[in-house]
Amino acid sequence: MEDKKALLNEIKELWKSENIENFDIAPELLEYLELKDLQELKEKILNSMSNLTDEQKEWLFKFRKYE
């Protein structure tokens, strides 16, 4: 479980670098996710970040929900 939490913190940091600070996974759901699932999520985030141009990121940022 500690490995999952560490990986989840890495994912949160990735989102934070994209100005999405309120990302979280419910602890109940974290129990059912495999470490592999979280690793794939992290990889997908990294791939999507590297594939977007700055212009695309700026456009997507406009749709962010503000609290």
Image (tube, grey):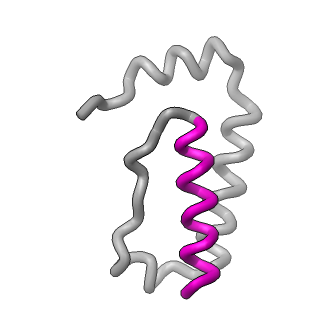
Question: Residue 20: percent from the left, percent from the top?
Answer: 46, 39
The stretch in magenta equals 1-17
Q: Residue at x 76, y 34 (%)?
A: 50
Vertical arrangement, residue 22 with respect to residue 28, above or below: above
Dominant SS in magenta: helix
Say which residue appears at 53% left-offset and 54% top-offset.
12
Quarter-wise, where is residue 56 in the image? top right
Find the residue positioned furthest to the top.
55
Rendered image quadrant of residue 41? bottom right
Q: Is residue 29 left or right of residue 48?
A: left
Residue 39 point in image, percent of width and height: 68, 67
Pick the front one: 52 or 2: 2
Q: Residue at 63% of width from left, 69% of height from top? A: 7
- Which of the image's four quarters has the N terminus? bottom right
The quarter of the displayed image where residue 30 is located? bottom left
Q: From the viewer's perspective, is residue 58 above or below residue 49?
A: above
Magenta stretch: includes residue 2: yes
User: Is 62 above or below relative to 40?
Assistant: above
Q: How many marks?
A: 0
